[in-house]
Image (cartoon, grey):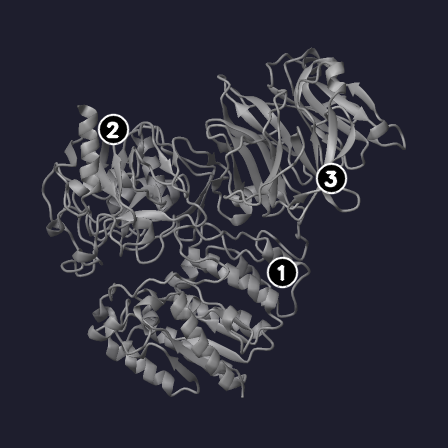
Amino acid sequence: MLIILIVLTALFCACTDSNSALSNCLDVNSTVDSLPGMLRISSRGMTRLGTNESFAKANERPSMNVGLNYEFSIGRHEVLCDEFNALMEPATGLSLLCASEKIPATDLTYYDAVLFANERSKSEGFDTAYTYASAQFDANKHCVNLDGYVFHPEKKSYRLPTEAEWSAVAEANWDVSEAWVAENSDYKLHDVCSRSDNEAKVCDIIGNAMEWVNDWNGIFRDTALTNYVGAPDGGSLGIRVVKGGSYRNFASTIKLYDRGDVYTVTSTTHTEYLGFRLALGAIPNPVWLDENGAVKESVVKSQVGVYEMKKVAGTFESKLVFRNDFVDNLSFIDFGSGVVSVVEIDGTQKAYHPDISPDGKRVAYCTGLEGVSDPSNVFVRNLDAKGSGLVKLDVENAAIPRWRILENGDTAIVYVSSAANNKDDAAFAKTSTWQVTFSNGKFGTPQKLFDGAYHGGVNATNQLAVTGARILRARVAHEGKTLANGNDTVWYGGEQACNASLANDGSDRTLFLDFGGKTGAKFVGQSYRTHERLLVADTKGNLIQSVAAPNGYTFDHSEWVLGGSNYAVASLANVNGAHQKIALINLSDGSVKTLVEGEEIWHPCLWHSKNNYSSKYLDTDSAGVYYLSSAFYSALELRVKMQRFWEERNSITAVALGSSRTMFALHDKSIKSHHLLNMGFSGAQLTGMSYLFFNYVLNHLKKLKVLVLEMSPDFLWYDGYTTWNYVIYDKVPGYKYDENHNFWVDGLPEHFVDAVKVTPRSETALLHPYDLDDFLLPDSYWGFPMIVRDTTAFTLDSPVLKENFDNFKMIVETARLLGIKIVVAIYPQHPGYAQTGSFGVYGPKRSYAKKFIDSVKTMDVILFDENRFGAHDYTDNMAYNMDHLSTSGAMIFTRRLDSLLYKLNK
């Protein structure tokens, strides 16, 4: 009977889609907690995340039901400004300006909020819910990155509420009449709980300050889950969830299912209307949904940042692949993307002993285990989420593949016919080691190298091969000969050993593990447990080094790091034999650093590119680094444009500068009249545009004939700090590095462009409907002509307005003096704005917009006005939203602009 009731409840939830509390579906009980400012929450039934409304954003659909089978506490109101300062000023130096004692703490990054949660946990004797390796702060003391950040849902600690917890509480208390919203707020924050006096009820869950919640912003599925805690990680762009709207939003526009703001929200976002409230309580048996919609009961968490890995590798190009035994599949981290995201590779075969190709683009693996005689096959696939390009080696049995570069430059894979126990001499003699070339996604013809299964590796000069699957064996070539005529020998006194790995740096050292044998104990000077020591032997098999495992752990699955370095990787198993960590072992100092944590993670392979372009003239920690995960996604867009800028600088004849309206409306690859580069990026206004124009465009585009310059009157009132300095310039080192070198007006240093190509670049997340090659949005419709800024807030005496318009005029005047033709583009917005008092989504008054457009007409420019104050011919299917064209609209806009440019060429 109980099972039937639960099913019926879930069905009722799934069929209802409104903002009101669903009393038949969700029963939330709140009582005053003994903890200051907290309410104790228990719930029955399902809360609803997302919606089935077709007009909602993609990441808000479909509706998904979530049950919570535990109690937790939540703040009655947002954390107060004074409350925040009391803990954080001593801890990090961040101090907010508080307008009153009861005003919410706002203008805080996600990381600021979680650090506060940790501080409150420590102050009240709780464990901390968030761990990290190191913290980075900007000039204003805001935390902008936590390297090795991990959330621990199993801990009873102060933390941010999950989206499901927040929604359950909000759904039961949704009352717009008690909210500070645009209709009554005077566009400013108010004291908490000033519209509600019920001590046992949350307040300001709608409006006043928008609120951070704990979750990464992932996808939803049409399903029901229990104890859902979001996406496993931030994917490629690190998008976060914010809830509840703010004093800036009209009541009718705030929905329970809303998950974001006007622009994409990341962990480093902070603005004057964004705050948070706390939750407290352990989450039993949490579940995540990955980017493919798969339910995860366990996730692997990285504990190392991009720059930390670069210090090891000397390059941003690093990848870690490993077996996640919990899901019976391979996962990987691409540190070169700039985002430390664990990606599970789609696949159906068992996958063991992965090895990354020399170029870092593919992974080889087998279906059998070292020390096991079961049949095994070798596969190669691309190192991407889909595991594309899957190829099987067509032989009867193949195990433990290892890539190598042959003397003639060909890429090959060495494998063995069997990875079985190698202790018996007769059985071992029946096995063999093989090699097969791999090119253009295809295997060549396998060739036998010699007898014996030497799967620990074959050195570059074909003089040494090793293996370890019960005992440590070596095959050594006679002087002047190759391994085909070599001698088989047993090292380490025939004692039990395994996980042999031959160094790839030319030293021919052998890494291996033993079982606490006498030889190892004598070398170390004390006895130890099985796999408690990582051992290193020289080319004769003599021990030369030993590294101890961390307390409470032993090593397993040891391998040298690929790319030639004095580092190794290994799994770390706890006292119960669970492989909970993958560690990086520094053989130079014996230190052991955790890279990732999980439940059962095996067979790590860490690859570094050999492309290290650092020199006394080029600091690759900064050169060309125009994007990092701590920056906004607009930095990623511009990073892609900057690479093209440097690569194509000698042939570009036209350039476009502007915001996302330029970026999405003008498809530069379709322009035929010029070699045009579209340098538009999200949120750009005149500060960023003039910075690019005067420092890059004028200095390096020697063939420039045409400048396409965006005029968006609404952006004239946006200051340069929030649209350029804060979101890009101060977040990445690349622009300041160029600036410190006078923007390379005397010429680029050797390998500068090569260095730019390998700096962090993340692919767009599923939550972004465009890719980084074309920047085209899917066809949708104009939607509703929303206005998100009060048009009366725009004044003609604004110093920001004057600075921006002066910048615009300076760009125009400079280009004109240099003989560059200037096309000023005004991009289409929702035609419905013609029936409002606003020019567009961000204002200003239409009369103000007309004033500035009329002023542009007096300049020596060609005005390309495709908006015409809403009287344009861009139909609904040509739009993505109220102020951006879709692909169809972009093709129309681009053709029209190309036609104009052709005429200007005559």
Write the residue at 33% across / 50% down.
59
Q: Which residue is mark 1?
A: 753
Task: Give the CA separation, mark 2 to mark 3.
Answer: 58 Å
SS of the residue at dot 1?
Answer: helix
Q: Quadrant of residue 699?
A: bottom right
Q: Mark 2 or mark 3: which is in front?
A: 3
Q: Is residue 669 left or right of residue 392?
A: left
Q: Is residue 15 left or right of residue 399?
A: left
Q: Which residue is mark 3?
A: 445
Q: Is residue 596 left or right of residue 270?
A: right
Residue 42, visible in the rendered structure: no
SS of the residue at dot 3?
Answer: loop
- Give the image location of residue 385, x and y in percent: 50, 43
Q: Amino acid at mark 1?
A: Val
Q: Earlier in the sequence, mark 2 or mark 1?
A: 2
Q: Amino acid at mark 2?
A: Asn
Q: Is residue 51 left or right of residue 539?
A: left
Task: Give the CA separation, mark 2 to mark 1.
Answer: 54 Å
The mark found on residue 69 in the picture is 2
Tags 1 and 3 in contact by the CB under 8 Å rule?
Answer: no
Task: Give the CA separation, mark 1 to mark 3.
Answer: 38 Å
159 up-or-down from 56: above or below = above
Write the residue at 56% across / 27% down.
571
Dot 3, how many residues are within 10 Å of its Cα: few (below 14), some (14-19), or many (20+)?
few
Dot 1, how many residues are within 10 Å of its Cα: few (below 14), some (14-19), or many (20+)?
some
Q: For this rendering, which residue is in front, 122 or 825?
A: 825
Quarter the N terminus occupies: top left
Q: Amino acid at mark 3?
A: Thr
